[in-house]
Amino acid sequence: MDPNAFLLIGRVLNYAGLVLAFVLILPLLTLVLPGLVAGLSKGLARLIDKAMSGALAVAIFATVFLVFAQLIGVVTSYSLGLNWTWLSELVIYAFATMFMFGSAVALRNSAHVRVDIFRPQFGETGRNWIELAGIYLFLFPIMIRILQTGEQGLTRSWMLFEGSRESDGLPILFLFKTLLPVFAVLMITQGLSEALKAALRITGHLEPETNQHPEGAGHGA
């Protein structure tokens, strides 16, 4: 395939990213103009949460595939003395897929481990402000940085349709490397939903969470 085609795709995605970046301002607009954008914010948050069910399905499939691939690898290795690089790579790819797609779902379900010691000391409003600040100060910048730093390497990998460095490996290393930007996009998307819900709770346009973890349990976005 013409390398210029990949470069063109990269430029289009960059411009699309710049346009979509304005969407990340919506939670802040919800704080400033709640009466004007609350309905839009609620609808978008619900849409994102529902769409993450697709990522959950991928993560579940990857988990089941991982178990079977690992089981086959163990049985053939210990009973038949056979080892295949492609099978080992399948296990690695399945695990990476499970993790990369499941992380955003875990964020939606408040299953990420927290390390802060201040959040449990605040009330509902304080926790929502911390949630909002954490998303803007840490989650968004880190994920955007991941997208920026991996652009050139990923483009080159797709241009070459990069495969395994082993002779009996899988010819899909370029797909494996694509999991990282997919992870970043999913995390940004779900982070937007969490920020919207935090802003809506702060402004009183969304009921407080009823599934808060016990104080000090260490879970959350």
Image (cartoon, helix red, strand yellow):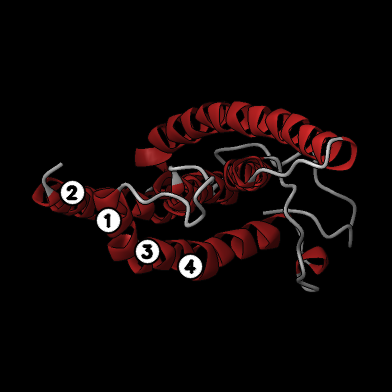
Residues under numbered marks 1 and 2 in contact, where contact means CB atoms less than 8 Å apart: yes
Residue 165 can be seen, yes or no? yes
Picture coordinates of residue 113 (x, y %)?
77, 59
Which residue in the protein does label 4 denote? 142
Of the numbered discs in the image, which one, if any, rests on residue 150?
3
Question: Mark 3 or mark 2, which has the lower sequence index?
Answer: 2
Picture coordinates of residue 68 (x, y %)?
76, 29
Of the numbered discs in the image, which one, if any, rests on residue 6?
2
Disc 3 to disc 2, how far (Cα)? 14 Å
**Nearest to the observer: residue 10 or residue 129:** 10
**Nearest to the observer: residue 77 or residue 113:** 77
Disc 1 to disc 3, how far (Cα)? 9 Å
Indicate the secondary structure of the residue bearing disc 4: helix
Disc 4 to disc 3, how far (Cα)? 12 Å
Q: Residues within 10 Å of mark 3 (few under 14, many from 20)?
A: some
**Nearest to the observer: residue 30 or residue 149:** 149
Residues under numbered marks 2 and 4 in contact, where contact means CB atoms less than 8 Å apart: no
**Residue at 20% in and 52% down:** 10
